[in-house]
Amino acid sequence: MEDFHGYRLESFDPLAYFAKGSKWGLNDFLHWGHVGYDKRRAITAGAAGVDRLYRERDPAYMRMISDFIDRFRDFDLIVMSTYNFIHPEVLARELKKPIKVLGFIDDPYSTYMRGVPFLWAFDGAFFISPSYIDDIPFQDAIARWSNKPATWWPLVPFPFQRPEKVDEQFFRDRDVDVVYVGNPSATKVDRLIQLKHHFRERIHVHGRWPFKGYIGFIRGVLGKPIYPHRVTSLSQTERTEIYWRTKIGFNMHVSDRAYETGNMRMYEAPAHGMMMVCDKAGGDAHTKIFESGREAVYYDTTSQAIEIIEHYLHKEDERARIAQAGFERYWRDYQWEPNLLRFLEWASSIRASNIDC
């Protein structure tokens, strides 16, 4: 429990109710794959898993639901800030008093699995990506799915200390050319292969990669190009330290086309004084977050990203100027605490729908 500007904040962990190893049968694995076999995965994998756990009256799931209802029945506001794990029928029937807000946090890939099927039981929604697919703004897309109010809530990093002294040299005196910190996906690793081949030791790549960071080698067994470099994870302190030393922060999203935008890395790079080089989004929504060419630089392809990075590594004045503008924009508009407070004030103003059941 935490007091935040007059709001009492509490969290809830649904996975605590499911012992590791909670499974369905082998036939379920053969039919549904890992998500349809592992109950801990099913609870956050989407509407189908939540619906199955509820329909089958899984004992751990029903115990979790009962505790959730007892704990939050009289709260003013419930925010599903990751994935919804409560069956929508339960939300509508048992939790009528609280205002309920659903988060769309992993879109466009999760939209029709973890978002739209639940939306009817909520009073409003937030989204972290201003863009969706096919050049459709997320605000417009969500309006097609329901008439519920929705707002953009930037996925900014948790609070950290802003340096006391920020002058021109703060953006210039850096000894690391490029950094990327993130977990792997197939298309992301393909892009990193191109970057590493070109920049070699000038780019630092870190993240929580499987198999102790050697997943890039194992890709060869699957017939994919290998990433022949071990990738190590960083502690929060280590990540912060390398960010303060880096000239250019490279960013990319899961989609290999211009769809979503606004992952946490997109805010972390400018926040630490790096010039950000980032992929574009559908409908140019990326420019809503940081202005193109002034606060960040955007690319269409990995080859173009390489050219952009090389250009700005040789144009220190231009790089430092853009880095400073992005830094100032972050600390003016995207700090964690003011953003959370604005969101809570917006969410608290929604009227609970009290759906009849």
Image (tube, rainbow, N blue to C red):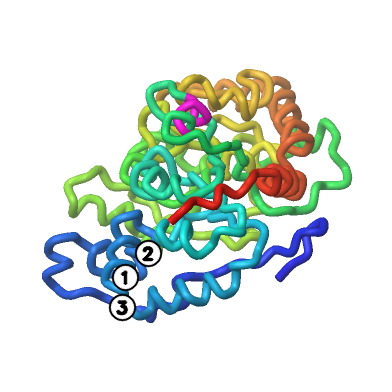
Q: Position of residue 16 (x, y in %)?
A: 47, 76
Q: Is residue 300 above or below residue 101?
A: above
Residue at numbered disc 3 = 22
Residue at numbered disc 1 = 39
Residue at numbered disc 2 = 43
**Which badge, 3 or 1, is on the more N-terminal residue?**
3
The crowd level at tag 1 (other Cα within 10 Å; few <14, some 14-19, many 20+) is many
Q: Quadrant of the C terminus?
A: bottom left
Residue type (three-letter) at the residue carrying disc 1 = Lys
| Residue 24 is a magenta residue | no
**Magenta segment range?**
137-142
Which residue of the protein is positioned furthest toward the front in this rendering?
A: 356
Do the CB atoms of the residues marked 2 and 1 lie less than 8 Å apart? yes
Residue type (three-letter) at the residue carrying disc 2 = Ile
Q: Is residue 79 above or below residue 339?
A: below
The disc placed on residue 7 is none
